[in-house]
Image: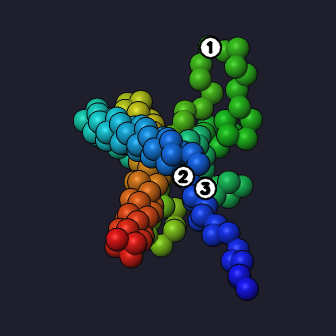
Amino acid sequence: EKIELPDARTTAAPRQGNRPGLAIGILKEIEKLLRDWQRELQELTLRIQDIRLEGPVIDGWLDSQPEATPKHPGFLQHAELTDLQSYVDTIHPSPQGSGEISERVAYRLCHLDTDGQVRCQECPVDQVASVSLAIARHQKLRQLLSRKQHLELRLGQLAETLVTVHGHLKESDRKFR
């Protein structure tokens, strides 16, 4: 008697074998993304350097308050005439139509210390413009540094992933040789 053996099946090609360009296409997309991130990172680094070269950078804010505010409103014993006038002007400001400024403004530069407490110091009126620019530089710098940090994180994650994939491919290739 003759024994019939089942037909030997050929092993199916892996799914990627059906689309040989898929892996290459994905690698090209990753390469483009990587180049874009690197280019943006270089641009950010240059913009950060430019901002630092423009002038001082201040982490803080300007606060304004009327200069003529009495220390203890409602409590006057012995006062100079100018103190009394300032006190009256604070309570009842003069009409704006008189052509005079009714009250002067004092500026303070404020920031948070390492304990999270607000600290302030006087800022002369003639320095308000330059201090404002320094504060604006700090805010722009924070935005750029945040984006730079995000890109560096993404690049690091991509590098780790690619190292892992590369290791798996080398290991897999050794097993089947």
Residue 27 image point, x, y percent: 45, 46
Where in the figure is residue 168, as x and y percent of width and height?
Answer: 42, 70
Q: Looking at this rendering, what residue extends furthest in the left direction?
A: 53
User: In the rendered image, is residue 10 in sight?
Assistant: yes
Judge from the rendering whether residue 16 lies leftward or rightward of residue 111; answer left or right. Answer: right
Q: Is residue 97 left or right of residue 54?
A: right
Q: Nearer the viewer, mark 1 or mark 2?
A: 2
Quadrant containing the N terminus is bottom right
Amino acid carrying label 2: it is Gly
Q: Assign a secondary structure to mark 3.
A: helix
Q: Secondary structure at mark 1?
A: loop
Which residue is denoted by mark 1 in the rendering?
A: 99
For label 3, the residue is 15
Q: Which residue is mark 2?
A: 17
Residue 173 drawn above or below residue 137? below
Please, what is the three-letter code of the amino acid marked with disc 3?
Arg
